[in-house]
Image (spheres, rainbow, N blue to C red):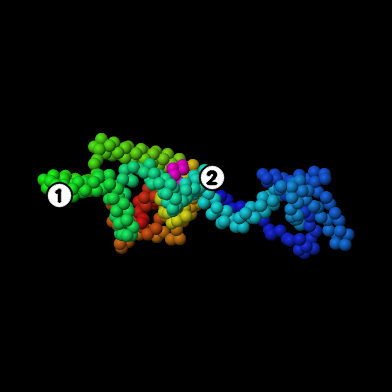
Amino acid sequence: MADEALATASVPSVGAGTSAAVAEPSPSSDYGSPTDAPGADTATSDAATGTTTVETDPVDSPEGVQDGRIVPQEFRELFKANPKLKNLFYSERAFRQEFPTVQEARKAKEFIETVGGEEGWQAIQDGQAKQQEIDGLYASRDPQKQRDFVKHLLTQDKGAFRAIVPVALAEFHQADPQTYNRVMSQIIANTFSGAGVANHLAQIKQALRSSPEQAEKLLDGLGAWVSDFEKVAQSKPEIDPDREAFEQEKAEWQKSQEKQKSESFSNSYRSEAGTLAQSATEKHLKTLLAGKTLDKESMDLLTRNVFQQVAGMAMQDEAYKRQMNGFVSRRDQARAVRAFTAKFNQLLPEAAKKVYRVFNLGASPKTAPAQTTPARGTTPTPAGMVQVMRPPKPGEVDRSRTTDSMIMQGHAWLRDGKHVKWE
């Protein structure tokens, strides 16, 4: 998270108190120091009040408009003595106009990073515009737009479209039986017309008067057509084995590619973020150790425990988790690393202190009475060791025989020759 923005005292309003006030020119767009060139300001004096006012040159104001902002006279003297203060003053005021509090600025920054910056936001806008266009086609009563909507679904995935149409018809029948029957009647009528059913029935009617045998043959033909009609209705969709194999192979390839991309992103992200976290942790631990040097095994053990503490604390922040999920889902490594590093550095001091206290490195306990017998409820002490209640004081430890790793594991040699163990 970015450092706290510079906070300044509230600027008195015009006429507040008795302090003289002057109008200051606005800063440049990049917060550069305003120019105090001759002629930039026009000074006027009021003999009755003893106040001097300097009006802003319209050329120095945004879009050439005189903004009339003023600052106390004592601020102007400070600005002359230190021009950088003028830059900070205007920068702070411009920031506060957009974000009254630092929390609001942080939320805005998190939102911008979550959507992927300008490019991510533009992609979202484009996607929404396309979706609105499709929604408009769906809701339209214009036959041509309705056909365009159906064609859109068909071109997106022909197989999916073919599979969903029967489901849509079944739902259509449940939702509006009357309209469903009318639509299906039109389909049946067109089918009968295309098959010449009406003409076939007329031939049967005529044959019944003149040739019953011919009429019977015609009826058998009509019956066979109806039978074929039923078979088609009850048959399963034909599946092209080659096409099915291709689609299956394509799906597996896409799944494999997606897995490879995810693994590649994960490995690269973890490597970069882990390196930064490792460096920050070791640097911070060296500060806590205050010159004390640990062996590699002990330092690695401390570092791993710090990582675990930070991870547990970070997972309690729901906003952080949502932000990271967004970056990871888009495989935005740069923003993911920045967000992780900022969060890690924020939690590192507290996590390191917890781990440091747990291992009691360099700590001086209030009392450290030695026990010749193990305390009740403790684990058995190895032969030759003496169980004690608390870690010994640093001055009592024989450093020639005791390593940092031994201390972190809970045992040490004392100067009096005892080998002690503590919980």
Q: In front: 186, or 400?
A: 186
Position of the C terminus by quadrant = bottom left
- Residue range in magenta is 326-333
Q: Which mark is residue 209?
A: 1
The residue carrying mark 2 is 118
Q: Amino acid at mark 1?
A: Arg
2 vs 1, front mark: 1
Residue at 80 percent of width and 46 percent of height: 40
Image quarter for residue 213? top left
**Front residue of 198 and 316:** 198
Judge from the rendering whether residue 117 lies leftward or rightward of residue 85; answer left or right.
Answer: left
Q: Depth check: give the residue in front, 10 or 182.
A: 182
Residue 260 figure quarter: top left
Closest to the observer, 32 or 385: 32
Task: Tell me what residue is drawn at x 32 percent, y 60 percent.
Answer: 178
Q: Residue furthest front?
A: 210
Q: Earlier in the sequence, mark 2 or mark 1?
A: 2
Secondary structure beneath dot 2 equals helix
Q: Position of residue 14 (x, y in %)?
A: 76, 61
Say which element carries label 1: helix
Q: Position of residue 167 (x, y in %)?
A: 30, 52
Q: Amino acid at mark 2?
A: Glu
Disc 2 to disc 1, how far (Cα)? 83 Å
